[in-house]
Image (cartoon, rainbow, N blue to C red):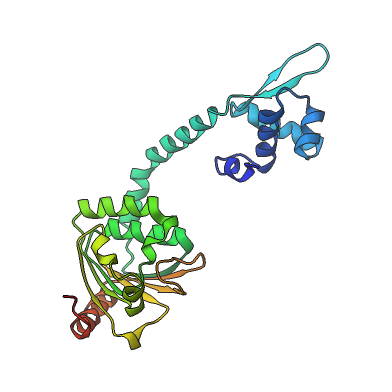
């Protein structure tokens, strides 16, 4: 039932199955574990040994047969804390290497909701004003609520301004949206005949193109973000943005 969540903590598929089996059924012998977890007995021995090493189960010695039982599930919290501490140790060095990469221009792709979170991390890392063409309120998809609130809290701390050209349909469907935008916002509305299923985001030396935006107020699971990292290109897009801004509808 919780195999994927357990695997995300670093357990193998067999370890996850066995740990969950022991949590549910309590003290068991290897044969019983293998049957209930639906894995081969030979594989069960290795997985149990690894669970013991990780402190997630323990062996009970007996004159008849040795059995095993699960450690309190709160132990899982310790695993995540240990992983976090290990990551914190190496982050400064990794960030130093990442920051000093000599990459003047590059292109890559993000996908899905996690891709949107990556874009937000990039915006915060750059710390410059954000320009958006064809905004469709997709950032406010309910599934992004926690990450979005964290993003805007930090964006406000860094005094990032958001200058957005909203898609005409977005303002038709959610007319009061700008009043609830949780940061400094300047906006205008693109003419109706220029509504599209794409959008463009410019910040710092980055240009991000969103594709597949079918629905106002939603970020599709399969949305693709084409990331272009180029100071010259980003400045060109900002120049074009200024032209479109001047031609777009002012909001009274």
Classify residue 35 as left or right of residue 249. right
Q: Residue at x 72, y 28 (%)?
A: 25
Q: Residue at x 33, y 44 (%)?
A: 92
Instruction: Please indicate, yes or no, whether residue 142 appears anywhere in the rendered image.
Output: yes
Which residue is at the front of the view, 192 or 45?
192
- Counting from the top left corner in percent of width and height, residue 30 is at 78, 28
Instruction: Please indicate, yes or no, whether residue 49 appears anywhere in the rendered image.
Output: no
Classify residue 252 as left or right of residue 229. left
Which residue is at the front of the view, 5 or 214?
214
Q: Quadrant of the N terminus?
A: top right
- Counting from the top left corner in percent of width and height, residue 163 is at 22, 69
Quadrant housing residue 35: top right
Total labels: the figure holds 0
Q: Quadrant of the C terminus?
A: bottom left
Image position of 194 with respect to 159: above or below: below
The residue most toward the top is 63
Quadrant housing residue 190: bottom left
- Counting from the top left corner in percent of width and height, residue 121 is at 34, 56
């Amino acid at each position: 039932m919780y195999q994927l969540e357990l695997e995300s903590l670093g357990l193998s598929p067999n370890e996850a199955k066995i740990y969950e089996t022991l949590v549910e059924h309590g003290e068991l012998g290897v044969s019983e574990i293998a049957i209930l977890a639906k894995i081969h007995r030979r594989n069960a021995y290795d997985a149990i040994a690894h669970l013991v090493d990780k402190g997630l189960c323990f062996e009970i010695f007996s004159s008849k047969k040795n059995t095993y039982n699960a450690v309190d599930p709160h132990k899982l919290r310790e695993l995540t804390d240990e992983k976090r501490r290990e990551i914190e140790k190496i982050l400064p060095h990794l960030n130093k290497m990442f920051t000093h990469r000599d990459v003047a221009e590059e292109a890559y792709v993000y996908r899905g909701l996690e891709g949107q979170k990556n874009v937000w991390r990039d915006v915060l890392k750059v710390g410059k004003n954000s320009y958006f063409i064809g905004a469709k309120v997709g950032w406010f998809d309910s599934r992004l609520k926690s990450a979005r609130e964290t993003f805007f809290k930090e964006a406000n701390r860094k005094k990032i301004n958001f200058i957005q050209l909203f898609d005409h349909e977005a303002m038709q469907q959610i007319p009061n949206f700008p009043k609830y935008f949780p940061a400094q916002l300047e906006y205008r509305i693109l003419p109706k005949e220029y509504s599209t299923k794409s959008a463009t985001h410019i910040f710092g030396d980055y240009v991000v193109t969103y594709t597949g935006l079918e629905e106002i107020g939603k970020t599709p699971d399969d949305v693709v973000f084409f990331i272009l990292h180029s100071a010259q290109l980003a400045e060109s897009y900002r120049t074009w943005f200024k032209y479109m801004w001047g031609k777009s509808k002012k909001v009274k």
